[in-house]
Structures are given as C-alpha cells and as structure tokens.
Amino acid sequence: MSILLSDAGLHHHLLPLTYTRPVGALRAGILTIAETWQHLTDMPVGFRTEDYLQAKFPEVGGGRLWEVHGGMLPTAAIAAAVLDLDPGEALVQGGRPLAFCSEGNAHAAEMDWTMAPAYFTQKEFSGPITLLERPWHLFQHCGAAIANDFAMLTDGRRSGPISALNTVIGDPAKIFLEPGAKVEASILNTTNGPIWIGKDAEVMEGCMIRGSFALGDHSQLKMGAKIYGACSFGPECRVGGEVNNSVILGYSNKGHDGFLGNSVLGEWCNLGADTNTSNLKNTYGEVKAWSFATGALEATGQQFLGLVMGDHAKSGINTMFNTGTVAGVCANIFGSGFPPKHIPSFAWGGAEGFKTAVVEQVFSTCQRMMERRHVQFTKLDEDILLHVLGATAAQRN
C-alpha cells in the first residue's frame, strides 16, 4: 500500500519551482507535501511527474495505491477520506477529482484531474481543501499549512525548554523547539499563529518573530532578523534582515539585511547583501508575473507579489527586484538597476543584458555550495539541470 502524488497538470503553472521537483515535493508549511502525507499515513510516498524528474523522484510499487492530487495540502480529514477509498473509487469535490484508488497495475494509466473517469465510483468530500496551483499560493497558504503541520508534529510531545531570556507574546504553548534548537534573547509572538523551531536550528539574539513561523532543521536566523508571519524556511537555511509572508524551500541563504516579501525561493539560492524585493506596486494595482504556461506576462489577481526564484539562482550585492519578478533555475543576477521581470534559467547578467551561463561554471558552483551543507551534487542533479538548460533555450533568445 502506498501514496502516489500526481503533478495533476500543474507542472507548467508552478514553474520555475517545479523545473527541479514534482508538485508534491513543494513546501508551504513545516514539511513538504510528500512528508506530510508520509506522517499522516505511515506509508511510502512516490510521485507521478515529468519523465526527466522521475529517476530522482520515483513512483512507488504495486499493490493497493491511492493516487492523490499533488498540489492538495494534506490534512488529517483529507487523509482519512483518501484511505477510506476502495479500488475503483474516486474522491471528488464538486465533480473535481482529489484522489483515486486502484490495485495492481490499474494505476499505470495517468488520471484525468479535471473530471473523474466514468468507471470510477465517486465519493464526495465536503470538507475544506487547499490547492497549490500557482507559485504565490505557497506563501498565501503558508499559515494554514504551518498550523496543520504544527498540530500533527507536536501532538503528544513536549517542546524543548524556552530560555527565560526570550520575551513571549501570546500563548507559550504555541512555541515548539525540536531537540537541539536554540533561541536566545528574542521576541516570539504567537498571537497570529504558532512558532516551530527545527532540530539543531538556531534563532540568534535580537530576532523578532511573529507566527505563523517555521524554521527548518539546522537552519539559522541571523541576529536582529525581523520576521513577519506567515513564513516557512526549510532545512539548512541562513536568513537575516526583514522577511514578510515568504517561503524558502530549503538550503538557501538570505543572510544579510534587505527586504524579502510575498516571495518564494527554491533550494540552493543565495541573495547577496542588501538584495531587496518590491512586493507592492506604487499604484497599488494588480501585479503581473511571467507565466510559463503562456510564455508571457499575465495578470495574477494579486496586489502583493515579490520574487519567485528557482533552484540554484543567485543575486549579487544590492540587487533590486521589481514587483512580480520571476527568476529561473541557475540564474545569476547582478549589477545596478532593475533587471527584467522575467529572468530565464541559466541567464547571467542584469539590467544591462544577459548571457547564457557556462555549464561547467554552474555545476562547479552547485557542487561547492552543496558540499557546504554536506549534500552531494549527483549525476541525477546534473541531468535534471541539463534538461532545464535545453528546455529553456528559447526563453534566453
């Protein structure tokens, strides 16, 4: 028995974040979607995703299998409804499929996520659901995702001790420190949501944190950081300065002063000192952002939207990002002035123009950065990045 998370037709809509991972490997709360499913079901979790990603993110074996919409945030109620399905049944809401149950090789055919096939018996789910269908949905639903994960991860457990040198505003029971976590001489406000500090993570002196907030395992919050909820920083991050309602998937650095607001950063990103994002237009109007599905700037329906950055992208010191900027995988942005709102993958440069990155230099940088976090840059990683390089050539032209 196992869970299979399907991209459900969302791969292009969640780029550049999904250039290097399935939809179900995204993080909006404390855990990734896949990790939450594993905790809720205690089952193996696999992925149905793009062919070039499948080797690194494999499917799961035979037997009874529940194929689930990968962009749906899992909750205990949803997990119970999914596992209640028998083979040949589909969980739907308003006619839209949320999950299918099959046995043996019946799951080999890809499901239609706009309408349940007629040969499936439909079971209606009446509870609330949250779908991550665009990059900005990660920070918009970050608070709810943290609250769900917090309740699951802390149930029946006792937090590590909170130092008396900290100032706590709100309910101290909404603060949870995993083993080895350190928080000293900081202000922790749980009025609007919980605060979770991961294993061996550190909140340095003078930080001001408003929940909902999650700091991943082995991550650091630098001295004097100002964090407005809801924010989630994955494992092995280094974060300083001012951050508002943003998600960092993991292994990325924003170690210096500068503002990051209403943004999503992938893994292995680095923002140079005093990098700043604009998250609100001077006109207070609707933000446009690059759509990979249409290949053009599109209205987002959002008033607040900062930066969306793919894995391994970097910015130089004093970089300024306009409202609704989208930077691709392995992009390297530097120089004065505002760069364009769409920065293709493997593009190096800034406001004065871009050139295509030298692959050997990119891979060397990836290897050095990942070694600093004791993670190997593998042949699978190389193959994925080479696929992205080829698939995005037209964008750089």
Image (cartoon, rainbow, N blue to C red):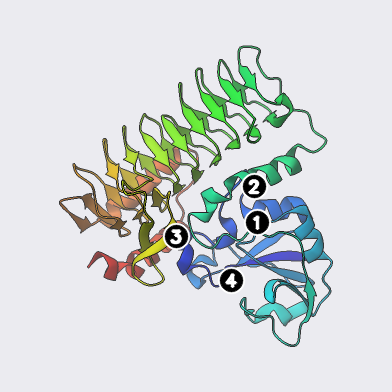
Residue 111, given in percent of the width and then of the height, sits at: 64, 79
Query: Which residue in the protein does label 2 denote?
Result: 144
Counting residues from the N terminus, which is met first, the one under dot 3 or under dot 2? 2
Report how far apart the C-alphas of labels 3 and 4 lie in the structure.
Answer: 22 Å
Secondary structure of the residue carrying numbered label 3:
strand
Report how far apart the C-alphas of labels 1 and 3 lie in the structure.
Answer: 21 Å
Is disc 2 surrounded by few (<14), some (14 to 19) or many (20+) residues within 10 Å?
A: some
Residue drawn at (61%, 51%), measured in percent from left and top?
32
The mark lying in front, picked from 1 and 3, is: 3
Secondary structure of the residue carrying numbered label 2:
helix
Secondary structure of the residue carrying numbered label 1:
loop
Query: Which residue in the protein does label 1 denote?
Result: 73
Q: Which amino acid does label 2 sit on?
A: Ala
Residue 107, given in percent of the width and then of the height, sits at: 70, 78
Q: What residue type is labelled 3?
A: Gly
Residue drawn at (71%, 26%), measured in percent from left and top?
171
Q: What residue type is labelled 1?
A: Leu
Query: Which residue in the protein does label 3 denote?
Result: 301
Counting residues from the N terminus, which is met first, the one under dot 2 or under dot 4? 4
Q: What residue type is labelled 4?
A: Ala
Query: Which residue in the protein does label 4 denote?
Result: 8
Residue 121, given in percent of the width and then of the height, sits at: 80, 81
Counting residues from the N terminus, which is met first, the one under dot 1 or under dot 3? 1
Residue drawn at (33%, 67%), measured in percent from left and top?
392
In which quadrant is the C terminus drawn? Answer: bottom left
Marks 2 & 1, CB-CB < 8 Å contact = yes
Q: Is residue 66 left or right of residue 350?
A: right
